[in-house]
Amino acid sequence: MAFWNLHMPCPSPPPEWPPTACLTGSSQQTITHVATWARWFFLLISILLGMGSIGLWLPSSEFLPDLTTYLDLPAEQAHWLNTSPLYRLVGFVITLVPALLLIRSINHARHMLDSFRHGHVLTLLNAMRLRSIASLVTGFGITFPLSKTLTALALTATNPPERQIHIIILNLSDIMLLSLGMFMWVLSWVMVEAARVGEENSRFV
């Protein structure tokens, strides 16, 4: 069946999806349409994130300015950074960690959208996926500024002491992202517990 066909019946759910979570009618058609295109959009975002993580460390005429901006360093410190292939490899490995966390969270979101597309929205499984997304976003909020700090430290480790960077690189957007992840985790924890209670009650009806 073509993915743009919105007039599909609500299928029998897998064991992990409660039957009571299935939606029908025009609301399901809208959810199916939005979820289908959002899955493709999130897939594109994941690919762009992966390409960006690699492209940041490829040699180019704008490599140092881009890297300095990424690390939130003053422009006058750009020439402090060692950019030999070995140092670029070390920097790539360090910055890959938060990128993988973000890509993993997007993958969880795509799984949620897939269940939405089949009519299963308010389920325990989706609540647990939302909690996983919140945990990964929180982890990204922690590891992203930490990776910038470690990268700057690694790229200046062999410099004279006065040209080594030993400061924690943290800005307002990092704090806001960490706060958002923690808020999402608390909210998703409540949703998981509520979904569990709902499933337990449904067994007695």
Image (cartoon, helix red, strand yellow):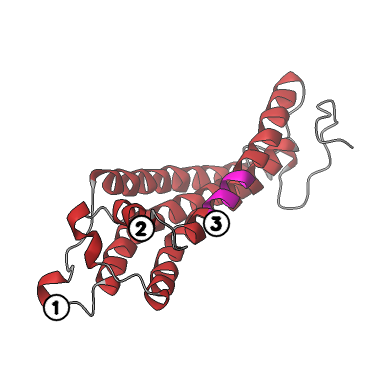
**Amino acid type, residue under disc 2 in the picture:** Phe
**Amino acid type, residue under disc 1 in the picture:** Pro
- Residue 142 in percent (x, y) is at 33, 58
**Residue under numbered circle 1:** 160
What is the residue that sits farthest to the right in this orientation? 1
- Is residue 51 among what the camera can see? yes
- Residue 171 in percent (x, y) is at 23, 48
Query: Which is more foreground, mark 1 or mark 3?
Result: 1
Earlier along the polypeptide chain: callout 2 or callout 1? 2
- Residue 202 in percent (x, y) is at 67, 41
Query: Element type at marker 2?
Result: helix
**Amino acid type, residue under disc 3 in the picture:** Gly
Quarter of the view holding residue 7: top right
**Residue under numbered circle 2:** 144
Query: Element type at marker 1?
Result: loop
**Residue under numbered circle 3:** 50
Quarter of the view holding residue 24: top right
Measure the C-alpha gap from mark 3 to mark 2: 15 Å
Q: Closer to the camera, 39 or 47? A: 47
Which residue is rendered at x = 46% and y = 64% of the image?
96
- Is residue 74 among what the camera can see? no
Residue 14 falls within the magenta-colored stretch:
no
Quarter of the view holding residue 60: bottom left
> Disc number at residue 111?
none
114 relative to 15, above or below: above
Query: Which is more foreground, mark 2 or mark 1?
Result: 1
Q: Closer to the camera, 49 or 133? A: 49
Q: What is the span of residues highlighted in magenta in the rendered image? A: 43-51
Q: Specify whether 161 is left or right of 56.
A: left
